[in-house]
Image (cartoon, coloured by chain):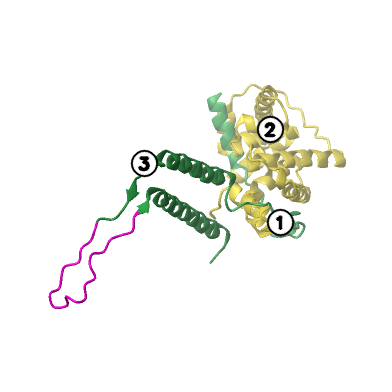
Amino acid sequence: MKKEDKYIRQWIKEVPREEPSPNFTANIMSQIKPLSAPAYQPLISKKMWSIIILSFLLLAIFLGYQEGQNTYFSWPEARLPEFNIIRFLDFGTFTSPAISLSIVAILMLWTFLLIGQAIKFHGFFKKNYVL
Amino acid sequence: MKKYHKDSYYIKKVLLGQVQFYAPLVEKHKLMAYNLAFRIVNDREDAEEVAQDAFIKVYKSLPKFRGEAKFSTWLYKIIYHEALGKLRRKKINTSPIEYNEDNQDLVTINDYLSRVKQETRQQYIEKAMQMLAEDERLILNLFYYSETPIKEIVVITDYTEANVKIKLFRARKQLKKYLQGLLKEELIDLL
């Protein structure tokens, strides 16, 4: 059967292909109209919403666990060198305000979400619009 | 050769309201679509009409297209049914000339074919193909020319897998028989 297949394939492929008329595509395009309504596509898909909600839930659980643990985040202390000449301009040491871990976690999550959305927007506009 | 995106790329654009993206989809598939129609109806004008109608029908059904089958499979299925419908409306019956089966093997037939000029060879093959029943002609073209798998031919023709295989077997046998007959006539003419 393989030899038979080989010959038949060879013969059929030898038959030249017929070409449609030059205005084949134009004829079709002249007869079609835009479909009733463009399909709605949300910018933030259901999957993305699930990820966002799940992240917030996990954060809430994490923060609830951390409640009362009294953990704070702070930058290391920075001390300016003392200038003898300008002693009267004593600014003292800089101390950073204590920021709770909750706020840091929220800020980090917010940043990741913004970066994710920026990438998604970039991809969306690149795909759908010619600049 | 022009490069095209995947079919899903154009379909997505069309569904978002950008009608102009249907044109490259038509350009991508028009040659095969037209030839498929032509192999069934055997007339240039009818083939053009069938293929164009099929593309328009496909366009209108695009919102329903789920992507389970390939776009081309869906298109060919519509062309197949449109073409058969056209033949029925024109009440065209193909009654092939009967040749006695002479059990010459394919190597001998191929040998005879290789001795004639390419143009003549193509004419014989085309003539033998035209003698086949429409569905056998279509299945041979899909299987050997487009290299369409049997499972897709099943979707296009609505035949069962067993039926497609039987028709393919019959089509091969008939093609061989018709080629033998035509080549015999050629040899008689030469003598």
* Secondary element type, mark 3: loop
Up/down of B41 relative to B1, above or below: above
Q: Are there few (<14), some (14-19), or many (20+) residues within 10 Å of tag 2?
A: some
In the rendered image, residue A84 lying in the magenta stretch gets the answer yes
Chain to which the residue tagged by mark 2 belongs: B
Q: Nearer the viewer, residue A39 or A116?
A: A116
User: How far apart are the alpha carbons under marks 1 and 2?
Assistant: 26 Å
Both marks 3 and 2 on one chain:
no
Magenta residues: mostly which secondary structure? Answer: loop
Query: Is tag 3's residue or tag 1's residue first in the polypeptide sequence?
Result: 1
Residue type pointed to by label 2: Val
User: How far apart are the alpha carbons under marks 3 and 2?
Assistant: 65 Å
Q: Read off the magenta span.
A: A77-98
- The residue labelled by disc 3 is A69
Q: Which one is in front in this view, the residue at disc 3 or the one at disc 2?
A: 3
Q: Are there few (<14), some (14-19), or many (20+) residues within 10 Å of tag 3?
A: few
User: How far apart are the alpha carbons under marks 3 and 1?
Assistant: 75 Å
Count of marks, rendered view: 3
Residue B126: x %, y % from top left: 67, 40
Any idea which chain is the yellow one in this picture?
A: B
Residue type pointed to by label 1: Phe
- The residue labelled by disc 2 is B155
Kindly identify the residue that appears in the image at 72 percent across and 38 percent down: B130
- The residue labelled by disc 1 is A24
| Residue B132 in view | no
Query: Viewed as shown, does residue A58 lie left or right of B75?
Result: left
Residue B131: x %, y % from top left: 74, 34
